């Protein structure tokens, strides 16, 4: 319709191809279907393979296509709404927490994390690794940094490491009174260990959600969570089942 | 340090290069500095240009580098924290609104928007275009969809179009009692008109924030806002000046 464009803007070739491909996906393909190979697609649309590849990358960014190792390029299902920070007063590990503890180590965090926590740069903190599964598939990986001062009664006797240790740290955290939690969302690329957990290649686009848990006027814990950007739509508040768009191409066509 | 990795994961070549480049950025370059050209960089690090390009793309995703037309690749400043939906009870156009109205048209919205608004598919709605500037630079572009039923007293006499019309729509919206606003964040690629407004190429990665404004038990307005993913970190709640990381490379080094 183009009615909301202020004025015509010249579009690169791959951009036009993306629009054409997007329409073909709607009309000719169903979710999960494997696309023809690049050579055939380039021939069908009369474009160079480099142009085709750019258009496919765009559609991947928008969540329309998924590239899966050993499978090929498939038509993606609509992104899942994954609820983030619904309750500003609930600690990690609370009754409605969607995260599963995987491991816990004690390690010196990155300098920026130490600064945010207010710990000394060389000070070790509890580092809880958790994962989040939705509809049976891994959607996010998290590192939760907890300074020893936030869990002073934690002892190493019962559970020195692993998921049991992680649960012990989370349990101790609940003793503090949480004032609020604040979050920030930004684009990132998956680190190797996260990528493996999320079944992606290192460097795949991810949405990084950093959450600061404030208790007693200071940051008592800090979470850095990495969500798959291809399959997830992060929801804040009661967004429910609203499916406003499937990639921005639905904004104004 | 690698202390938080569960087990070693094989890393692609460009990934290792990215880490090396990232360290070079920290030690040898300052913010705003222009990087040597690709040929020289590839030679310096002894890699193929394709590998170099992949590593540069990663660093761009993580907000470390910016590619600017006519300038080249420069070292990016830390991302700006841009506050999103701080007050769940304030309408667009309220006193603390960071958005500037640009234009207003009446147009049939995309089908998914009509469905979310509960309007008929062929029904026209007010479509307010707004832009958001932070630190003197454009950071986001928005389309705000307002069904006529949400602003029944709006007349076309005083301001039939343009920014004045947009302000009239926003003013009329304030008459409704806002119950709450819910948001979702996902990765997208910039449409041509947004890209122009944001000084990016079409298809550049953006963070798309969809916000539903609920009044009288129904969606009274719907905002689809496109934020530059390279320069913005979206903050929810009182995240303040916390700079936890500059791209995920700071998570665990």
Image (cartoon, coloured by chain):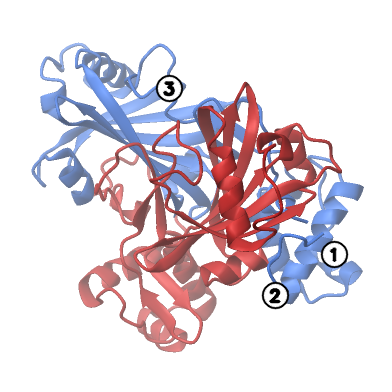
Chain colours: A red, B blue
Q: Is residue A64 above or below residue B25?
A: below
Which residue appears at 82% of the width and 53% of the height? Answer: B35
Cα distance, mark 3 to mark 1?
Answer: 41 Å
Is there CB contact under 8 Å for labels 2 and 3?
Answer: no
A155 sits to left or right of A119: left
For the residues carrying marks 1 and 2, which lies nearer the camera in this image?
2
Using the rendered view, name the quadrant where residue A7 is placed: top left
A117 sits to left or right of B47: left
Mark 3 — residue? B100
Q: Are marks 2 and 3 on the same chain?
A: yes
Mark 2 — residue? B9
Q: Is residue A204 above or below residue A39?
A: above
Cα distance, mark 1 to mark 2?
Answer: 26 Å
Using the rendered view, name the quadrant where residue B184 is placed: top left
For the residues carrying marks 2 and 3, which lies nearer the camera in this image?
2
Specify which label sits upstream in the sequence, 2 or 3.
2
Is there CB contact under 8 Å for labels 3 and 1?
Answer: no
Q: Return the residue nearer the eye: B197 or A226.
A: A226
């Amino acid at each position: 319709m183009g009615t909301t464009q202020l004025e015509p803007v010249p579009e690169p070739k791959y951009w036009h191809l993306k629009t054409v491909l997007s329409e073909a996906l709607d009309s000719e393909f169903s979710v999960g279907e494997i696309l023809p190979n690049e050579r055939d697609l380039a021939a069908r649309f009369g474009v160079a393979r480099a142009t085709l590849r750019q258009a496919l990358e765009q559609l991947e960014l928008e969540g329309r296509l998924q590239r899966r190792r050993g499978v090929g390029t498939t038509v993606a299902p609509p992104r899942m709404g994954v609820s983030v920070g619904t309750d500003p007063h609930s600690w990690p590990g609370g009754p409605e927490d969607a995260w599963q503890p995987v491991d816990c180590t004690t390690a010196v965090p990155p300098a920026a994390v130490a600064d945010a926590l207010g710990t000394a740069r060389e000070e070790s903190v509890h580092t809880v690794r958790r994962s989040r599964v939705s509809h049976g598939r891994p959607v996010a990986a998290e590192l939760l940094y907890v300074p020893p001062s936030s869990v002073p009664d934690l002892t190493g006797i019962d559970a020195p490491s692993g998921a049991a240790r992680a649960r012990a740290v989370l349990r101790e955290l609940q003793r503090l009174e949480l004032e609020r939690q604040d979050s920030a969302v930004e684009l990132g690329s998956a680190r190797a260990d996260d990528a493996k957990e999320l079944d992606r290649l290192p460097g795949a686009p991810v949405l990084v959600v950093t959450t600061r848990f404030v208790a007693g006027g200071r940051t008592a814990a800090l979470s850095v969570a990495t969500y798959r950007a291809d399959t997830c739509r992060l929801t804040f508040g009661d967004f429910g089942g609203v499916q406003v768009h499937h990639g921005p191409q639905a904004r104004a066509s």
